[in-house]
Amino acid sequence: MQKRVIITGAAGFVGSHLVERFLEDGWEVLGIDNFITSTPENLRSIEQNPRFRFVEADVVKLDIDSLMDFEPSLVMHMASPASPVDYFNMPIETMLVNSTGTKNMLDLAKKSGARFLFASTSEVYGDPEIHPQPETYWGNVNPIGPRAVYDESKRYGEAITMAYRRLYGMDVRIVRIFNTYGPRMRVNDGRVVSNFITQALTGKKLTIYGDGSQTRSFGYVTDTVEGIFRLATYEGLEGEVVNIGNPAEITVKELADIIMKLVPTAAGIEYLPPVPDDPRKRRPDITKAMNILKWKPQVPLEEGLKKTIDYFRRVLKT
Ligand code: NAD
Ligand code: UDP
């Protein structure tokens, strides 16, 4: 396989780490982003690399013919708002990037004869009735609630990806990413890890939505990126759908307690009303990833949180 990859959402939190992983492995990388939920800052360490090219564009409207000269062997569609606050604020952009944007990137992969990877999410499982969630679970999603703009457009993205496989015999893969945290998350992106760390470092109370008994399973970004890298690059995985996440499940209250222990300036907890349709629990079944990718998470939560706190200290200059 020629080592030439197009990565959409390249300036984002996960996307920028993924670009680095491919550059480390000797690939030429063409990144695309329109910065709706990121800034060029995330590309600072990457843009000097001669094997990296960047196109500022909206993938929904992008003319794919303008990219054909790059001759990608792999197209990875990572672009999409991912924080609930972002997709509540940008519902139409979120739906379009995961629907029309996915179709546009599938067409680019098809025309180039490239492999295609779609970045999906644990949100396709909605508020799950099966626990932990294996890839065979179809999910429990409210199609008209506020989260639907994300959940349902990711489900559409998965459906059209598999339709292109059935119709055109393309080599496609789908990664269902579970909650990921780490350096380059936006300070104000509204996700729980960034909120709690920012609040703790600035001497504010940590805001828990609801009673804090809801659970999540947090994966450190280098672990997530390694899983995605393997799913994208290993041979013989056509049509596979794989969960990537850390099965170490904790409640939101326990997360707050750990962060308050690591950041002594935290000013306690403030309980706020629950957000609508907030999934009660979430934990990946990663048996498939362990079997076919020989992958499992390496970074324990406290270690990952310490690195993330160090990053936030630098950004916030605390
Ligand atoms: P992010 O918001 O940091 O990055 C997304 C990037 O996509 C941003 O740079 C944004 O500007 C770009 N983008 C959005 N719409 C675009 C468009 N129309 N054209 C071009 N660029 C566009 O989010 P992230 O956490 O890095 O998430 C990356 C991907 O992983 C997303 O597809 C997301 O749904 C998925 N995901 C992330 C998580 C997580 O916990 N971080 C969990 C599940 C799934
Ligand atoms: N949450 C919280 N306080 C915050 C932000 C989030 O209690 O300041 C909760 C949120 O209600 C959810 C969990 O933390 O139950 C994870 O939220 P996040 O937005 O990080 O991601 P999600 O898994 O919901 O996509």
Image (cartoon, rainbow, N blue to C red):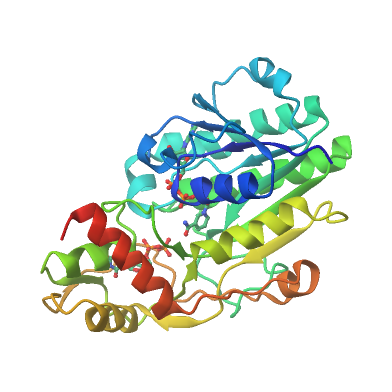
* Quarter where residue 309 is shown: bottom left
Q: Nearer the viewer, residue 94 or 305?
A: 305
Is residue 259 rendered to the left or right of residue 62?
left
Identity of the residue drawn at 48% across and 49% down: 150
Q: Where residue 120 sits in the image (x, y, percent)?
A: 60, 52
Q: Nearer the viewer, residue 299 or 286?
A: 299
The picture quadrant for ligand 2 comes to bottom left
Q: Where residue 193 sits in the image (x, y, percent)?
A: 33, 66
Q: Is residue 122 among what the camera can see?
A: no
Q: Is residue 269 among what the camera can see?
A: yes
Is residue 172 rendered to the left or right of residue 252?
right
| Position of 3 relative to 50 (above/below) | below
Identity of the residue drawn at 81% across and 52% down: 239
| Position of 218 relative to 124 (above/below) | below
If the image is split into quadrants, where does the C terminus sit?
Answer: bottom left
Q: Where residue 93 sits in the image (x, y, percent)?
A: 44, 34
If the image is split into quadrants, where does the N terminus sit?
Answer: top right
Identity of the residue drawn at 83% across and 31% down: 113
Q: Where residue 223 sits in the image (x, y, percent)?
A: 57, 66
Q: Nearer the viewer, residue 144 or 278?
A: 278
* Quarter where residue 3 is shown: top right
Identity of the residue drawn at 71% across and 33% down: 106
* Quarter where residue 257 is shown: bottom left
Is residue 260 rendered to the left or right of residue 158?
left
| Position of 250 relative to 270 (above/below) | below
Count of numbered circles in the view: 0
Q: Nearer the viewer, residue 73 or 34?
A: 73
